[in-house]
Amino acid sequence: MDTWIDTHCHLDEFEAHAGLEHLDRVRGEAAKAGVAHCVLPAVELSNLDAVRRLAHRHGDSYALGIHPLFTGRAGDRDVDALAEALAAHHGDPRLVAIGEIGLDYFVPELDGPRQERFYRAQLQLAQRFDLPVILHVRRSCDKVLKGLRERRVRGGIAHAFNGSLQQAEAFIAMGFKLGFGGAVTFDRALQLRRLAAELPLQSLVLETDAPDIPPHWLYVTAAERAAGAPPARNTPGELPRIAEVVAGLRGMPVDELAQATRANAIAALPRLAALLEASKVQ
């Protein structure tokens, strides 16, 4: 059944990796597995058009933004160019959010103040265009939350959440959903699995971050990579199996998790409602 929404998938990376035919095959396999919809976030100006084009090609949706990992090579006027793109496409029903934006304090060479400037500027755009945001929060939950308190937006998703219970509760209190994906499938991810099991059901959405964050059954170890094995590439088709892990952690039926996370995704990204309803009619 077409039940799952992958709330974070970089489909354009599959085209860049092996061409459009490969991408179409990956998306088609995901659809056969029951992934009805993917949200495609941009990461920099150079792929704004790609995510929009692919969302229209496959009946998916997209977000426009500048990822913190790309702020080092972004120009000082890139936020202005992003604003122009948002203005040009604001009437497109497939534009559902501003993203992927946020902060990253895992990569040591990133310029902290520079990425913070881009983050704050894009929160301003979220207010201006009245769109939710898709947030990158790697080792940055507290500072991301600080920015949200200073400039309130209409909610969204804290993607690949891996913070504390207190940080999770802070995002939830501000109207955000928390994205869970391949990382939750690893037995050693004790805190993350505890959160997936115990947080309120209405706070969870599911994602793959494909081709990144592969689940444990795809993971290639450092030793295997050293021996010549290629790194793992996640796909949106893995979402139903990731969902089975989350359902198992919560002790609930998979179909109930599908229904709940679908409703949660719509609550986080309200423009999804009309898109999903239209896809049922076709």
Image: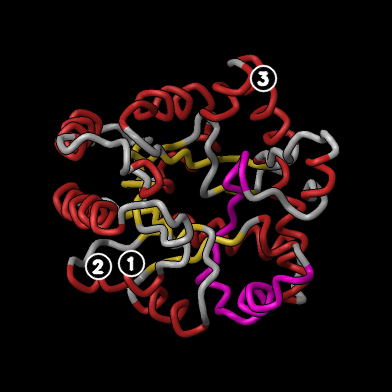
**Residue 146 colored in magenta in the image:** no
Judging by the rendered image, the residue that carries numbered circle 3 is 22
Q: Position of residue 193 (x, y in %)?
A: 68, 73
Q: Bounds of the magenta span?
A: 187-212
Q: Are marks 3 and 2 in contact (CB under 8 Å)?
A: no
Q: Is 250 placed left or right of 122 in the picture? A: right
Considering the image in quadrants, where does the C terminus appear? top right
Image position of 163 with respect to 230: above or below: below
In the picture, the disc for residue 147 is 2
Question: Cα distance, mark 3 to mark 2?
Answer: 39 Å
Which residue type does callout 1 highlight? Val
Image position of 239 with respect to 21: above or below: below
Considering the image in quadrants, where does the N terminus appear? top right
Question: Cα distance, mark 1 to mark 2?
Answer: 5 Å
In the picture, the disc for residue 43 is none
Q: Are marks 1 and 3 in contact (CB under 8 Å)?
A: no
Mark 1 or 3 closer to N-term?
3
Which residue appears at 51% of the width and 80% of the height? Answer: 164
In the picture, the disc for residue 144 is 1
Question: Cα distance, mark 1 to mark 3?
Answer: 35 Å
Which residue type does callout 2 highlight? Gly
Which residue appears at 40% of the width and 46% of the height? Answer: 69
Tag 2 secondary structure = helix
Tag 1 secondary structure = helix
Q: Is 220 placed left or right of 26 in the picture? A: right
Picture quadrant of residue 51: top left
